[in-house]
Amino acid sequence: MMAAMTVKTVVDDIADGGAGIKVFTLVDPDRWELPPFKPGAHIDVHLANGLIRTYSLCNDPTDNKRYVLAVKREADGRGGSIYLHDEIKRGGVIGVSLPRGGVPLPSHLTGFAFIAGGIGVTPFLSVAAHLRRIGRNDFVLHVISRGPPPLADMLAPLLQSGHVVIHDTWAGPRPDIVQLVGRPLADALIACCGPVSMIDAFEQASCDWPAVHVHVERFVAPPLPVDPQARAYVLALARSGQEIAVAAGESMLLDVPASCCGGICGACKVEWLQGEPVHRDRALSPAERERSLLVCVAGSASERLVLDL
Amino acid sequence: MPLRPKLAMLYERERNNAMLDIVTPESDAAASMWSGVVRHLHITPRAFLPMREMRELTLVAGKGIEGDRYMVGREEGFYSPKPEEGRQITLFEFETLIALKRDHDIDLGVDEHRRNVTTVGVPLTHLVGKQFWLGETLLEATRLSIPCRHIEEITGKSIFDPLINRSGLNCKILQGGIVRVGDVVRSMQ
Ligand code: FES
Protein backbone atom coordinates (compact mmCIF):
# COMPACT_ATOMS: atom_id res chain seq x y z
CA MET A 1 0.00 0.00 0.00
CA MET A 2 1.04 3.57 -0.36
CA ALA A 3 3.03 4.92 2.56
CA ALA A 4 0.85 6.51 5.23
CA MET A 5 -0.23 9.92 4.03
CA THR A 6 -0.16 12.67 6.59
CA VAL A 7 -1.90 15.96 7.14
CA LYS A 8 0.54 18.65 6.05
CA THR A 9 1.00 21.39 8.63
CA VAL A 10 3.27 24.38 9.07
CA VAL A 11 4.77 25.52 12.37
CA ASP A 12 3.10 28.88 12.94
CA ASP A 13 4.48 29.60 16.38
CA ILE A 14 6.84 28.19 18.98
CA ALA A 15 6.39 29.55 22.49
CA ASP A 16 8.17 28.86 25.75
CA GLY A 17 6.00 26.80 28.08
CA GLY A 18 8.48 26.94 30.99
CA ALA A 19 10.20 23.97 32.63
CA GLY A 20 11.89 22.80 29.40
CA ILE A 21 8.64 22.84 27.45
CA LYS A 22 8.01 24.31 24.02
CA VAL A 23 4.50 24.97 22.77
CA PHE A 24 4.14 24.39 19.04
CA THR A 25 1.22 25.78 17.05
CA LEU A 26 0.64 23.91 13.80
CA VAL A 27 -1.61 25.27 11.06
CA ASP A 28 -2.59 24.37 7.52
CA PRO A 29 -0.42 26.17 4.92
CA ASP A 30 -3.57 28.03 3.75
CA ARG A 31 -4.99 28.29 7.27
CA TRP A 32 -7.80 26.00 6.27
CA GLU A 33 -9.69 24.19 9.02
CA LEU A 34 -7.77 21.13 10.24
CA PRO A 35 -9.35 17.69 10.68
CA PRO A 36 -11.58 17.88 13.78
CA PHE A 37 -10.66 16.39 17.14
CA LYS A 38 -12.33 15.48 20.41
CA PRO A 39 -11.38 17.17 23.70
CA GLY A 40 -8.14 15.58 24.92
CA ALA A 41 -7.31 13.86 21.59
CA HIS A 42 -3.77 13.21 20.39
CA ILE A 43 -1.92 13.15 17.07
CA ASP A 44 1.18 11.44 15.73
CA VAL A 45 3.84 13.83 14.59
CA HIS A 46 5.93 12.47 11.69
CA LEU A 47 9.39 13.95 11.92
CA ALA A 48 11.80 14.30 9.02
CA ASN A 49 14.27 11.97 10.72
CA GLY A 50 11.74 9.14 10.45
CA LEU A 51 10.60 9.28 14.07
CA ILE A 52 6.88 9.26 14.84
CA ARG A 53 5.83 10.67 18.19
CA THR A 54 2.43 11.09 19.79
CA TYR A 55 1.35 14.29 21.57
CA SER A 56 -1.92 15.50 23.06
CA LEU A 57 -3.61 18.53 21.61
CA CYS A 58 -3.95 21.29 24.22
CA ASN A 59 -6.47 23.55 22.54
CA ASP A 60 -10.25 23.67 22.42
CA PRO A 61 -11.67 21.56 19.55
CA THR A 62 -13.65 24.56 18.27
CA ASP A 63 -10.33 26.33 17.75
CA ASN A 64 -10.26 24.27 14.56
CA LYS A 65 -7.52 25.92 12.56
CA ARG A 66 -4.71 25.10 14.97
CA TYR A 67 -3.16 22.08 16.60
CA VAL A 68 -1.39 23.19 19.78
CA LEU A 69 1.15 20.74 21.24
CA ALA A 70 3.30 21.12 24.32
CA VAL A 71 6.53 19.16 24.15
CA LYS A 72 8.91 18.71 27.04
CA ARG A 73 12.53 18.23 26.08
CA GLU A 74 13.45 14.78 27.37
CA ALA A 75 17.24 14.75 27.28
CA ASP A 76 17.37 11.00 27.86
CA GLY A 77 14.25 10.21 25.82
CA ARG A 78 14.25 8.45 22.47
CA GLY A 79 15.00 11.56 20.44
CA GLY A 80 11.61 12.84 19.29
CA SER A 81 11.38 15.72 21.75
CA ILE A 82 15.02 16.68 21.22
CA TYR A 83 14.43 16.84 17.48
CA LEU A 84 11.34 18.98 17.94
CA HIS A 85 13.13 21.31 20.35
CA ASP A 86 16.39 21.65 18.47
CA GLU A 87 15.58 21.24 14.80
CA ILE A 88 12.05 22.50 14.25
CA LYS A 89 11.75 26.20 13.51
CA ARG A 90 8.88 28.52 12.69
CA GLY A 91 7.73 27.96 9.11
CA GLY A 92 8.92 24.34 9.14
CA VAL A 93 6.63 21.72 7.61
CA ILE A 94 5.44 18.78 9.73
CA GLY A 95 3.20 15.89 8.71
CA VAL A 96 0.75 14.72 11.35
CA SER A 97 -1.81 11.92 11.61
CA LEU A 98 -5.53 12.39 11.93
CA PRO A 99 -6.38 13.06 15.59
CA ARG A 100 -7.36 10.02 17.65
CA GLY A 101 -8.86 9.34 21.04
CA GLY A 102 -10.05 11.91 23.51
CA VAL A 103 -11.48 11.99 27.01
CA PRO A 104 -15.10 10.80 27.12
CA LEU A 105 -17.34 13.46 28.68
CA PRO A 106 -20.89 12.08 28.92
CA SER A 107 -23.22 15.01 29.40
CA HIS A 108 -25.38 13.25 32.00
CA LEU A 109 -22.52 13.12 34.51
CA THR A 110 -22.48 15.80 37.13
CA GLY A 111 -18.78 16.10 37.85
CA PHE A 112 -15.33 15.45 36.42
CA ALA A 113 -12.00 15.13 38.21
CA PHE A 114 -8.75 15.08 36.28
CA ILE A 115 -5.39 14.14 37.73
CA ALA A 116 -2.31 15.15 35.78
CA GLY A 117 1.37 14.56 36.41
CA GLY A 118 3.62 17.28 34.98
CA ILE A 119 3.38 17.52 31.20
CA GLY A 120 0.48 15.01 31.46
CA VAL A 121 -1.68 18.10 31.95
CA THR A 122 -1.87 18.66 28.17
CA PRO A 123 -5.01 16.64 27.28
CA PHE A 124 -6.88 18.19 30.20
CA LEU A 125 -6.14 21.71 28.97
CA SER A 126 -8.13 20.84 25.87
CA VAL A 127 -10.84 19.17 27.95
CA ALA A 128 -11.06 22.13 30.35
CA ALA A 129 -11.32 24.63 27.50
CA HIS A 130 -14.12 22.56 26.01
CA LEU A 131 -16.02 22.18 29.30
CA ARG A 132 -15.81 25.88 30.08
CA ARG A 133 -17.01 26.83 26.62
CA ILE A 134 -20.11 24.64 26.92
CA GLY A 135 -20.81 26.13 30.34
CA ARG A 136 -19.84 23.11 32.43
CA ASN A 137 -18.04 24.30 35.52
CA ASP A 138 -18.33 21.10 37.52
CA PHE A 139 -14.76 19.91 37.07
CA VAL A 140 -11.48 20.06 38.91
CA LEU A 141 -7.99 19.57 37.54
CA HIS A 142 -5.26 18.41 39.93
CA VAL A 143 -1.80 19.15 38.61
CA ILE A 144 1.01 17.35 40.39
CA SER A 145 4.39 18.82 39.58
CA ARG A 146 7.90 19.05 40.88
CA GLY A 147 8.30 22.78 41.27
CA PRO A 148 6.03 25.35 39.63
CA PRO A 149 3.51 23.73 37.27
CA PRO A 150 4.23 23.49 33.55
CA LEU A 151 2.40 25.66 31.02
CA ALA A 152 1.65 28.37 33.59
CA ASP A 153 0.22 30.71 30.93
CA MET A 154 -2.31 28.16 29.79
CA LEU A 155 -3.21 27.21 33.35
CA ALA A 156 -3.60 30.81 34.54
CA PRO A 157 -7.23 31.35 33.47
CA LEU A 158 -8.20 28.01 35.00
CA LEU A 159 -6.41 28.89 38.21
CA GLN A 160 -8.26 32.16 38.32
CA SER A 161 -11.63 30.48 37.83
CA GLY A 162 -10.81 28.04 40.62
CA HIS A 163 -10.74 24.91 38.47
CA VAL A 164 -7.13 23.96 39.13
CA VAL A 165 -5.42 22.67 42.25
CA ILE A 166 -1.63 22.71 42.05
CA HIS A 167 0.28 20.14 44.06
CA ASP A 168 3.91 21.25 44.02
CA THR A 169 5.84 18.34 45.52
CA TRP A 170 8.89 20.52 46.13
CA ALA A 171 6.94 22.97 48.22
CA GLY A 172 4.70 20.47 49.95
CA PRO A 173 3.95 16.78 50.45
CA ARG A 174 3.06 14.44 47.59
CA PRO A 175 -0.71 14.25 47.33
CA ASP A 176 -2.34 10.94 48.08
CA ILE A 177 -3.85 9.65 44.83
CA VAL A 178 -6.33 7.56 46.79
CA GLN A 179 -7.64 10.72 48.37
CA LEU A 180 -7.81 12.60 45.09
CA VAL A 181 -9.74 9.75 43.47
CA GLY A 182 -12.08 9.45 46.46
CA ARG A 183 -14.99 7.07 46.88
CA PRO A 184 -16.76 5.77 43.78
CA LEU A 185 -19.51 8.03 42.50
CA ALA A 186 -22.26 6.93 40.15
CA ASP A 187 -22.48 10.22 38.34
CA ALA A 188 -18.88 11.41 38.03
CA LEU A 189 -15.89 10.67 35.84
CA ILE A 190 -12.25 10.56 36.86
CA ALA A 191 -9.32 10.63 34.47
CA CYS A 192 -5.56 10.54 34.73
CA CYS A 193 -2.56 11.30 32.53
CA GLY A 194 1.01 11.25 33.72
CA PRO A 195 4.02 9.04 34.35
CA VAL A 196 3.50 5.29 34.49
CA SER A 197 3.88 5.15 38.29
CA MET A 198 1.12 7.72 38.71
CA ILE A 199 -1.18 5.89 36.30
CA ASP A 200 -0.58 2.64 38.20
CA ALA A 201 -1.48 4.32 41.48
CA PHE A 202 -4.54 5.87 39.87
CA GLU A 203 -5.73 2.54 38.47
CA GLN A 204 -5.36 0.92 41.87
CA ALA A 205 -7.15 3.73 43.63
CA SER A 206 -10.03 3.66 41.18
CA CYS A 207 -10.59 -0.10 40.97
CA ASP A 208 -13.91 0.24 42.84
CA TRP A 209 -15.20 2.79 40.37
CA PRO A 210 -17.47 1.75 37.50
CA ALA A 211 -15.09 1.17 34.58
CA VAL A 212 -16.99 3.49 32.26
CA HIS A 213 -16.38 6.36 34.66
CA VAL A 214 -12.61 5.91 34.74
CA HIS A 215 -10.37 7.09 31.93
CA VAL A 216 -6.64 6.72 31.62
CA GLU A 217 -5.11 8.80 28.87
CA ARG A 218 -2.64 6.64 27.05
CA PHE A 219 -1.26 7.31 23.64
CA VAL A 220 -2.71 4.44 21.69
CA ALA A 221 -1.75 3.26 18.24
CA PRO A 222 -4.42 3.48 15.56
CA PRO A 223 -6.81 0.53 15.78
CA LEU A 224 -5.98 -2.40 13.53
CA PRO A 225 -8.68 -4.14 11.55
CA VAL A 226 -10.30 -6.60 13.89
CA ASP A 227 -9.55 -10.11 12.73
CA PRO A 228 -8.88 -12.60 15.51
CA GLN A 229 -7.54 -15.09 12.94
CA ALA A 230 -4.87 -12.73 11.67
CA ARG A 231 -1.29 -13.97 12.06
CA ALA A 232 2.17 -12.56 11.50
CA TYR A 233 3.94 -13.82 8.40
CA VAL A 234 6.80 -13.22 6.01
CA LEU A 235 6.07 -11.74 2.64
CA ALA A 236 8.58 -12.86 0.02
CA LEU A 237 8.83 -11.00 -3.28
CA ALA A 238 9.96 -13.53 -5.84
CA ARG A 239 11.34 -11.16 -8.45
CA SER A 240 13.13 -8.67 -6.24
CA GLY A 241 14.18 -11.25 -3.66
CA GLN A 242 12.93 -8.98 -0.86
CA GLU A 243 11.51 -10.43 2.37
CA ILE A 244 9.18 -8.35 4.52
CA ALA A 245 7.86 -9.19 7.98
CA VAL A 246 4.16 -8.40 8.33
CA ALA A 247 2.71 -8.19 11.84
CA ALA A 248 -0.65 -9.81 12.63
CA GLY A 249 -3.51 -7.67 11.38
CA GLU A 250 -1.23 -5.30 9.50
CA SER A 251 -1.64 -4.76 5.78
CA MET A 252 1.18 -5.52 3.35
CA LEU A 253 3.30 -2.41 3.04
CA LEU A 254 3.98 -2.69 -0.65
CA ASP A 255 4.37 0.05 -3.16
CA VAL A 256 1.58 -1.00 -5.50
CA PRO A 257 -1.12 1.31 -6.83
CA ALA A 258 -4.14 1.36 -4.56
CA SER A 259 -7.45 3.13 -4.70
CA CYS A 260 -10.31 2.13 -2.44
CA CYS A 261 -8.07 0.44 0.18
CA GLY A 262 -11.08 -1.73 0.99
CA GLY A 263 -10.90 -4.69 -1.38
CA ILE A 264 -13.54 -3.68 -3.90
CA CYS A 265 -11.86 -1.87 -6.79
CA GLY A 266 -9.10 -4.29 -7.76
CA ALA A 267 -6.48 -1.57 -8.26
CA CYS A 268 -3.96 -3.30 -6.01
CA LYS A 269 -4.21 -6.78 -7.55
CA VAL A 270 -1.00 -8.82 -7.59
CA GLU A 271 -0.25 -12.44 -8.41
CA TRP A 272 0.76 -14.82 -5.66
CA LEU A 273 2.92 -17.90 -6.16
CA GLN A 274 3.20 -19.86 -2.92
CA GLY A 275 1.59 -19.94 0.50
CA GLU A 276 -1.99 -19.65 1.62
CA PRO A 277 -3.46 -16.17 1.18
CA VAL A 278 -6.44 -15.02 3.23
CA HIS A 279 -8.28 -12.94 0.66
CA ARG A 280 -10.89 -10.83 2.50
CA ASP A 281 -11.72 -8.96 -0.72
CA ARG A 282 -15.06 -8.57 -2.40
CA ALA A 283 -13.86 -8.24 -5.95
CA LEU A 284 -12.08 -11.42 -7.08
CA SER A 285 -13.84 -14.54 -8.33
CA PRO A 286 -12.83 -17.92 -6.89
CA ALA A 287 -10.91 -18.57 -10.12
CA GLU A 288 -9.04 -15.29 -9.86
CA ARG A 289 -8.19 -16.00 -6.25
CA GLU A 290 -6.29 -19.07 -7.39
CA ARG A 291 -3.64 -16.71 -8.77
CA SER A 292 -4.28 -13.21 -7.50
CA LEU A 293 -4.89 -11.32 -4.31
CA LEU A 294 -5.72 -7.74 -3.38
CA VAL A 295 -2.87 -6.27 -1.40
CA CYS A 296 -4.99 -3.77 0.54
CA VAL A 297 -7.00 -6.40 2.43
CA ALA A 298 -5.27 -9.77 1.99
CA GLY A 299 -3.37 -11.56 4.73
CA SER A 300 -1.76 -14.95 5.00
CA ALA A 301 -2.69 -18.19 6.74
CA SER A 302 0.78 -19.59 6.08
CA GLU A 303 4.04 -18.50 7.64
CA ARG A 304 5.32 -17.39 4.25
CA LEU A 305 3.53 -15.89 1.32
CA VAL A 306 5.34 -15.50 -2.00
CA LEU A 307 4.21 -12.81 -4.44
CA ASP A 308 5.14 -12.38 -8.08
CA LEU A 309 6.71 -8.97 -7.53
CA MET B 1 -31.20 11.25 -31.44
CA PRO B 2 -30.44 7.79 -32.93
CA LEU B 3 -30.25 4.95 -30.48
CA ARG B 4 -26.92 3.27 -30.04
CA PRO B 5 -26.82 -0.16 -31.78
CA LYS B 6 -26.69 -2.15 -28.54
CA LEU B 7 -29.70 -0.33 -27.18
CA ALA B 8 -31.55 -0.79 -30.48
CA MET B 9 -30.94 -4.51 -30.19
CA LEU B 10 -32.39 -4.49 -26.72
CA TYR B 11 -35.51 -2.72 -27.94
CA GLU B 12 -35.81 -5.24 -30.77
CA ARG B 13 -35.73 -8.05 -28.23
CA GLU B 14 -38.30 -6.30 -26.09
CA ARG B 15 -40.59 -5.73 -29.05
CA ASN B 16 -40.65 -9.49 -29.58
CA ASN B 17 -41.86 -9.85 -26.05
CA ALA B 18 -45.62 -9.33 -26.16
CA MET B 19 -45.79 -8.27 -22.52
CA LEU B 20 -43.48 -5.31 -23.10
CA ASP B 21 -44.64 -3.94 -26.42
CA ILE B 22 -46.08 -0.90 -24.72
CA VAL B 23 -42.52 0.37 -24.15
CA THR B 24 -41.33 2.36 -27.15
CA PRO B 25 -38.06 4.15 -27.81
CA GLU B 26 -40.03 7.39 -27.51
CA SER B 27 -41.39 6.60 -24.09
CA ASP B 28 -37.94 5.56 -22.93
CA ALA B 29 -36.48 8.79 -24.24
CA ALA B 30 -39.07 10.62 -22.18
CA ALA B 31 -37.90 8.67 -19.14
CA SER B 32 -34.41 10.07 -19.55
CA MET B 33 -35.70 13.64 -19.51
CA TRP B 34 -34.67 14.29 -15.96
CA SER B 35 -33.46 17.51 -14.49
CA GLY B 36 -32.08 18.23 -11.05
CA VAL B 37 -30.49 20.92 -8.99
CA VAL B 38 -27.19 21.75 -7.26
CA ARG B 39 -27.85 21.64 -3.53
CA HIS B 40 -24.36 22.02 -2.04
CA LEU B 41 -20.86 22.82 -3.25
CA HIS B 42 -17.65 21.90 -1.41
CA ILE B 43 -13.91 22.02 -1.91
CA THR B 44 -10.82 21.40 0.17
CA PRO B 45 -7.22 22.30 -0.67
CA ARG B 46 -5.57 19.15 0.66
CA ALA B 47 -6.14 15.50 1.55
CA PHE B 48 -7.82 14.88 4.96
CA LEU B 49 -8.81 18.52 5.54
CA PRO B 50 -12.50 19.26 6.12
CA MET B 51 -14.53 20.17 3.05
CA ARG B 52 -15.64 23.80 3.07
CA GLU B 53 -19.09 24.78 1.84
CA MET B 54 -19.05 27.32 -1.01
CA ARG B 55 -21.79 29.36 -2.66
CA GLU B 56 -20.14 28.96 -6.04
CA LEU B 57 -17.28 27.11 -7.68
CA THR B 58 -15.12 28.08 -10.64
CA LEU B 59 -14.65 25.15 -13.00
CA VAL B 60 -11.75 25.19 -15.44
CA ALA B 61 -12.13 22.95 -18.49
CA GLY B 62 -9.72 20.03 -18.53
CA LYS B 63 -8.25 21.04 -15.16
CA GLY B 64 -10.57 21.03 -12.19
CA ILE B 65 -12.08 23.34 -9.61
CA GLU B 66 -10.20 26.41 -8.45
CA GLY B 67 -8.90 25.84 -4.94
CA ASP B 68 -9.67 22.13 -4.84
CA ARG B 69 -7.10 19.47 -4.06
CA TYR B 70 -7.37 17.76 -7.44
CA MET B 71 -6.99 20.90 -9.58
CA VAL B 72 -4.31 20.16 -12.16
CA GLY B 73 -1.15 21.86 -10.93
CA ARG B 74 -2.15 21.65 -7.28
CA GLU B 75 -2.18 17.89 -6.79
CA GLU B 76 -2.64 17.73 -3.05
CA GLY B 77 -5.39 15.12 -2.93
CA PHE B 78 -5.21 11.64 -1.49
CA TYR B 79 -5.28 10.24 -5.03
CA SER B 80 -3.07 12.85 -6.67
CA PRO B 81 -0.25 10.30 -7.11
CA LYS B 82 -2.71 8.51 -9.42
CA PRO B 83 -3.85 11.28 -11.76
CA GLU B 84 -7.15 10.72 -13.54
CA GLU B 85 -9.25 13.04 -15.69
CA GLY B 86 -12.39 12.06 -13.82
CA ARG B 87 -11.13 13.63 -10.60
CA GLN B 88 -11.58 17.12 -12.03
CA ILE B 89 -14.98 17.25 -10.36
CA THR B 90 -17.01 14.71 -8.38
CA LEU B 91 -20.74 14.62 -7.66
CA PHE B 92 -22.88 12.91 -5.03
CA GLU B 93 -26.62 12.36 -4.72
CA PHE B 94 -28.36 13.99 -1.78
CA GLU B 95 -30.76 11.06 -2.03
CA THR B 96 -27.94 8.73 -0.93
CA LEU B 97 -27.61 10.64 2.34
CA ILE B 98 -31.32 10.10 2.91
CA ALA B 99 -30.93 6.41 2.08
CA LEU B 100 -28.01 6.02 4.50
CA LYS B 101 -30.19 7.36 7.27
CA ARG B 102 -33.21 5.30 6.26
CA ASP B 103 -31.40 2.00 5.64
CA HIS B 104 -28.44 2.13 8.03
CA ASP B 105 -29.33 4.86 10.53
CA ILE B 106 -26.14 6.71 9.59
CA ASP B 107 -26.14 10.50 9.61
CA LEU B 108 -23.68 11.55 6.96
CA GLY B 109 -23.33 15.28 6.45
CA VAL B 110 -23.11 16.97 3.07
CA ASP B 111 -19.55 17.94 3.93
CA GLU B 112 -18.57 14.38 4.84
CA HIS B 113 -18.94 12.44 1.59
CA ARG B 114 -16.00 14.45 0.20
CA ARG B 115 -17.42 14.97 -3.29
CA ASN B 116 -17.61 18.50 -4.69
CA VAL B 117 -21.24 18.77 -5.75
CA THR B 118 -24.29 17.43 -3.94
CA THR B 119 -27.20 17.11 -6.35
CA VAL B 120 -30.91 16.48 -5.96
CA GLY B 121 -32.94 14.76 -8.65
CA VAL B 122 -30.01 13.69 -10.81
CA PRO B 123 -29.66 9.97 -11.62
CA LEU B 124 -25.88 10.07 -11.28
CA THR B 125 -25.34 6.34 -11.60
CA HIS B 126 -27.02 6.41 -15.04
CA LEU B 127 -24.69 9.00 -16.46
CA VAL B 128 -21.42 7.13 -16.89
CA GLY B 129 -20.11 7.90 -20.38
CA LYS B 130 -22.61 10.70 -20.89
CA GLN B 131 -22.35 14.46 -21.07
CA PHE B 132 -24.62 16.74 -19.06
CA TRP B 133 -24.97 20.37 -18.03
CA LEU B 134 -24.09 21.49 -14.53
CA GLY B 135 -25.36 25.06 -14.57
CA GLU B 136 -23.44 26.75 -17.37
CA THR B 137 -20.68 24.13 -17.37
CA LEU B 138 -20.55 20.93 -19.38
CA LEU B 139 -19.31 17.70 -17.80
CA GLU B 140 -18.64 14.21 -19.03
CA ALA B 141 -18.97 11.37 -16.54
CA THR B 142 -16.00 9.00 -16.70
CA ARG B 143 -16.95 6.41 -14.06
CA LEU B 144 -18.77 5.78 -10.84
CA SER B 145 -16.81 6.91 -7.81
CA ILE B 146 -15.56 4.18 -5.52
CA PRO B 147 -15.74 4.59 -1.77
CA CYS B 148 -12.40 4.80 -0.05
CA ARG B 149 -11.47 3.27 3.29
CA HIS B 150 -9.86 6.45 4.52
CA ILE B 151 -13.27 8.15 4.57
CA GLU B 152 -14.10 5.94 7.58
CA GLU B 153 -10.99 7.19 9.33
CA ILE B 154 -11.86 10.81 8.58
CA THR B 155 -15.53 10.64 9.54
CA GLY B 156 -15.30 7.95 12.22
CA LYS B 157 -18.41 6.38 10.62
CA SER B 158 -18.72 2.90 9.11
CA ILE B 159 -19.81 3.98 5.68
CA PHE B 160 -17.52 2.09 3.31
CA ASP B 161 -19.87 -0.83 2.72
CA PRO B 162 -23.12 1.17 2.53
CA LEU B 163 -21.50 3.44 -0.06
CA ILE B 164 -20.49 0.69 -2.47
CA ASN B 165 -22.16 1.41 -5.83
CA ARG B 166 -23.56 4.73 -4.67
CA SER B 167 -20.54 6.76 -3.90
CA GLY B 168 -21.08 9.36 -6.60
CA LEU B 169 -19.74 10.16 -10.03
CA ASN B 170 -16.32 11.16 -11.38
CA CYS B 171 -16.39 13.67 -14.22
CA LYS B 172 -14.12 15.68 -16.44
CA ILE B 173 -14.93 19.28 -17.25
CA LEU B 174 -15.53 19.90 -20.97
CA GLN B 175 -16.68 23.50 -20.65
CA GLY B 176 -15.76 25.57 -17.60
CA GLY B 177 -17.61 28.39 -15.88
CA ILE B 178 -19.17 29.29 -12.57
CA VAL B 179 -21.47 26.82 -10.81
CA ARG B 180 -23.74 28.14 -8.09
CA VAL B 181 -25.94 26.51 -5.47
CA GLY B 182 -29.40 26.28 -7.02
CA ASP B 183 -28.14 25.84 -10.58
CA VAL B 184 -30.02 23.36 -12.74
CA VAL B 185 -28.41 20.08 -13.75
CA ARG B 186 -29.82 18.76 -17.00
CA SER B 187 -29.29 16.03 -19.49
CA MET B 188 -27.77 16.64 -22.93
CA GLN B 189 -30.54 14.57 -24.52
S1 FES C 1 -7.13 -0.67 -3.42
FE1 FES C 1 -9.07 -1.23 -4.12
S2 FES C 1 -9.01 -3.37 -3.94
FE2 FES C 1 -7.14 -2.76 -3.07
Image (cartoon, coloured by chain):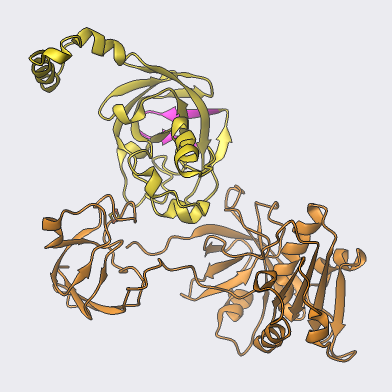
Is residue A71 positioned above or below B3 on the image? below
Q: Is residue A56 magenta?
A: no
Image quarter in which the N terminus of chain A is found: bottom left
Q: Position of residue B89 (x, y in %)?
A: 40, 34
Asked if residue B189 shows in the view, the reply is no
Q: Position of residue B23 (x, y in %)?
A: 20, 11
The one nearer the camera, A75 or B94, is B94
Image quarter in which the C terminus of chain A is found: bottom left
Magenta segment range?
B56-66
Is residue B114 positioned above or below A284 on the image? above
Asked if residue A156 shows in the view, the reply is yes
Q: Residue at x 58, y 59 (%)?
A: A10
Query: Is B31 placed left or right of A195 in the picture?
Result: left
Question: Which picture quadrant has residue A57?
Answer: bottom right
Q: Residue at x 32, y 69 (%)?
A: A253
Query: Is B185 placed left or right of A293 in the picture?
Result: right
The majority secondary structure of the magenta stretch comes to strand
Question: Which picture quadrant has residue B91?
Answer: top left
Supply the letter of whichever chain is orange: A
What shade does chain B have?
yellow
Q: Quadrant of ligand 1?
A: bottom left
Q: Position of residue B130 (x, y in %)?
A: 27, 24
